[in-house]
């Protein structure tokens, strides 16, 4: 065996297989959406618990008005982004569909969930490799993020429609049926706020899992959402599932 | 016969001048947001239409709706409405009593089938076969069913008839039930409020008599002309809300300056009613103007949507002092702690693995 052959074998061993997962529109959407959620949660928190009163002539101050304005503006960004994201589930690659359609009818999906849970409870030695989301992540994304966002969009538009009033699409399409469905306006406000905490909890788990898996699963997670490529640091272990 | 007498005849008989009558018509048109051209239509209707018999029933209630109604500040309104409609049964204000009163009710039901209006104040309690509210020796539920069987339409006066109000607040021991959940086959107009504004009540009746149809209702069944906007939308303290100037506690400097009552629990932003425009007692004032937040009395189950003095609603499932933020903070803190512990365990595992390698 020549020296050269040895070298190339060595190189091959260290090569990191990479897969293009997140297309550019997905990545842009992800960060715009993250920014919108941050703005919505921050301003939303203050809408329910207003900051200390400011003195002065109300003609020249519009602090609470601006807080609400930024909330509504970010809400529209979230809405339009989400509509685009749903469109991209059809137009984009097969990874783009993943969080909308967790493959709950497949046995190996649930085996994947169980294995992933074991991994998080320190019972499994190694996580399985997935090109997109792992099954547990897909499930959490679907339940907490997708449905959480839909819930916030629907209740949010219903509350917004109260201000725009009867005859506007926000009122006619949302407020008119959402408010009686929950009971009264106060209930929609309360549930919308519970929804905020639901999303905040999702964000905590999402960021933690992304950072942790980036380190522990020996594959890129965070940089993938910037570059689009997922690198696997251990070439010996191939992606286990190509959902 | 009484039924052929028109509103106008009655008014003239009562010594009301034509000039006063026309004034009333314009004011009513304005109150209903109809525009000046409708004043003549109202006048025409009142001059030509026979009076419609109205049965005013009282269930489980406090009679605050009647108290409000008879204080209608609209010029002439109480005289006009009370003499205009043929109020054939109203046990609070009718002269007749006992069998005589019940006879009047029976008379209308039998002689004006499909042509009379039932106004319900209060609601029927359904527990113990309705024994918690007895009218003329029978459960109110029976009187309600009997009176509404052949009626043209029902007016649910106040939050009791519309939603249940205080007697239906948790745990609702008598199972007080709003009218629309007991009588399901009749058109029902809800005029919620505890009590509703007097001018709103008189205007709803005037509209129905004038145009011979129900006013436009929203999805909940409330007349759009009075319940399509929130107290907040027309509140005179709204500039302070937008500016971020709030009363922090009652009797602080901000309260004296008349800042927004949002932080001390004003329910104006979630309450559909006309208080901030029509106001009360001849337009003298309304709760917010008096320095107290709106308690949301015209909203469904407002007794259970407390506290009236906090912006965020109480969540009863998690103990006495919970709201969305205490529940949310606790949940986020629990998840955050779990994440921190998990992260620490992950580090330990990794260090152990590194050592093993």
Image: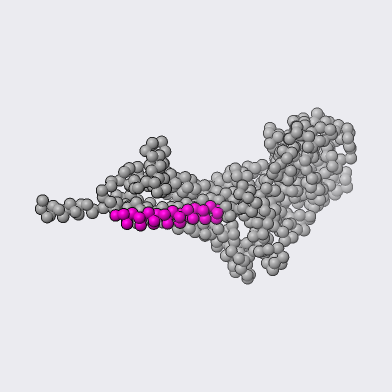
Magenta stretch: residue B333 in it? yes
- Point 45% across, 52% down: residue: A205
Residue A59 image point, x, y percent: 62, 68
Q: Which residues are magenta?
A: B328-357
Q: Main secondary structure of the magenta part?
A: helix
Q: Quadrant of residue B294?
A: bottom right
Magenta stretch: residue A51 in it? no
The residue closer to the viewer here, B47 or B121, is B121
- Point 75% across, 48% down: residue: B195
Residue A121 image point, x, y percent: 42, 48
- Point 29% across, 51% down: residue: A232
Q: Left or right: where does residue A38 sit relative to residue B260?
A: left
* Location of residue A64 with respect to B59 vertically, above or below: below
The residue closer to the viewer here, B205 or B102, is B102
Q: Quadrant of residue B57?
A: top right
The residue closer to the viewer here, A56 or B340, is B340
Residue B138 image point, x, y percent: 81, 32
State how many labels appear: 0
Q: Left or right: where does residue A29 sit relative to residue B16?
A: left
Among all residues in the image, which is located at the extreme left? Answer: A2
Residue A215 visible in rendering: no
* Location of residue A46 with respect to B117 vertically, above or below: below
Residue B172 image point, x, y percent: 71, 41
């Amino acid at each position: 065996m020549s020296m050269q052959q040895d070298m190339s074998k060595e190189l091959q061993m260290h090569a990191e297989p990479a897969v293009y997962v997140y297309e550019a529109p997905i990545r842009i959407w992800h960060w715009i959406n993250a920014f919108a959620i941050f703005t919505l949660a921050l301003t939303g928190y203050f809408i329910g618990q207003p900051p200390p009163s400011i003195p002065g002539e109300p003609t020249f101050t519009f602090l609470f008005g601006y807080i609400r304005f930024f909330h509504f503006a970010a809400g529209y960004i979230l809405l339009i982004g989400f509509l685009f994201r749903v469109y991209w589930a059809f137009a984009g690659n097969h990874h783009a569909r993943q969080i909308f359609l967790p493959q709950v009818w497949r046995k190996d999906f649930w085996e994947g969930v169980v294995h992933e849970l074991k991994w998080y409870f320190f019972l499994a030695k190694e996580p399985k490799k997935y090109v997109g989301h792992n099954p547990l992540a897909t499930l959490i994304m679907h339940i907490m993020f997708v449905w959480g966002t839909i819930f916030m969009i629907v209740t949010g538009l219903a509350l917004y429609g109260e201000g725009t009033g009867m005859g506007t699409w926000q009122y006619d399409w949302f407020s008119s049926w959402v408010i009686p469905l929950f009971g009264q306006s106060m209930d929609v406000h309360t549930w919308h706020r519970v929804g905020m905490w639901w999303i905040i909890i999702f964000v905590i788990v999402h960021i933690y899992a992304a950072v942790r898996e980036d380190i522990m699963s020996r594959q890129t997670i965070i940089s993938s959402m910037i570059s689009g490529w997922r690198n696997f640091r251990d070439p010996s272990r191939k992606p286990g599932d190509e959902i | 016969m009484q039924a052929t007498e028109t509103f106008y005849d009655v008014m003239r008989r009562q010594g009301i001048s034509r000039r006063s009558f026309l004034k009333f018509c314009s004011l009513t048109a304005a109150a209903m947001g109809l525009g000046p051209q409708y004043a003549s239509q109202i006048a025409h209707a009142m001059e030509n239409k026979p009076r419609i018999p109205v049965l005013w029933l009282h269930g489980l209630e406090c009679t605050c709706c009647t108290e409000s109604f008879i204080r209608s500040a609209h010029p002439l309104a109480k005289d006009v409405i009370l003499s205009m409609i043929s109020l054939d049964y109203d046990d609070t204000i009718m002269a007749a009593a006992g069998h005589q009163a019940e006879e009047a009710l029976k008379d209308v039901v039998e002689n004006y089938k499909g042509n009379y209006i039932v106004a319900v104040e209060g609601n029927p309690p359904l527990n113990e076969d309705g024994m918690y509210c007895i009218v003329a020796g029978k459960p109110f539920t029976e009187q309600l069913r009997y009176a509404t069987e052949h009626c043209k339409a029902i007016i649910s006066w106040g939050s009791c008839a519309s939603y249940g109000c205080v007697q239906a607040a948790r745990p609702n021991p008598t199972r007080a039930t709003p009218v629309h959940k007991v009588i399901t086959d009749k058109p029902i107009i809800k005029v919620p409020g505890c009590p509703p504004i007097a001018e709103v009540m008189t205007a709803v009746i005037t509209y129905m008599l004038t145009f011979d149809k129900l006013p436009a209702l929203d999805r909940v069944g409330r007349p759009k002309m009075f319940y399509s906007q929130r107290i907040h939308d027309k509140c005179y303290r709204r500039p302070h809300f937008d500016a971020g100037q709030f009363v922090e506690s009652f009797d602080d400097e901000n309260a004296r300056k008349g800042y927004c009552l949002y932080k001390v629990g004003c329910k104006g932003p979630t309450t559909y009613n006309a208080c901030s425009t029509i106001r009360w007692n001849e337009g003298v004032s309304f709760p917010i103007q008096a320095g107290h937040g709106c308690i949301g009395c015209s909203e469904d189950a407002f007794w259970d949507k407390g506290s009236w003095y906090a912006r965020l609603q109480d969540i009863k499932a998690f103990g006495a002092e919970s709201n969305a933020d205490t529940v949310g903070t606790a949940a986020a803190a629990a998840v955050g702690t779990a994440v921190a512990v998990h992260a620490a365990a992950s580090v330990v595992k990794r260090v152990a693995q590194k050592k093993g390698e």
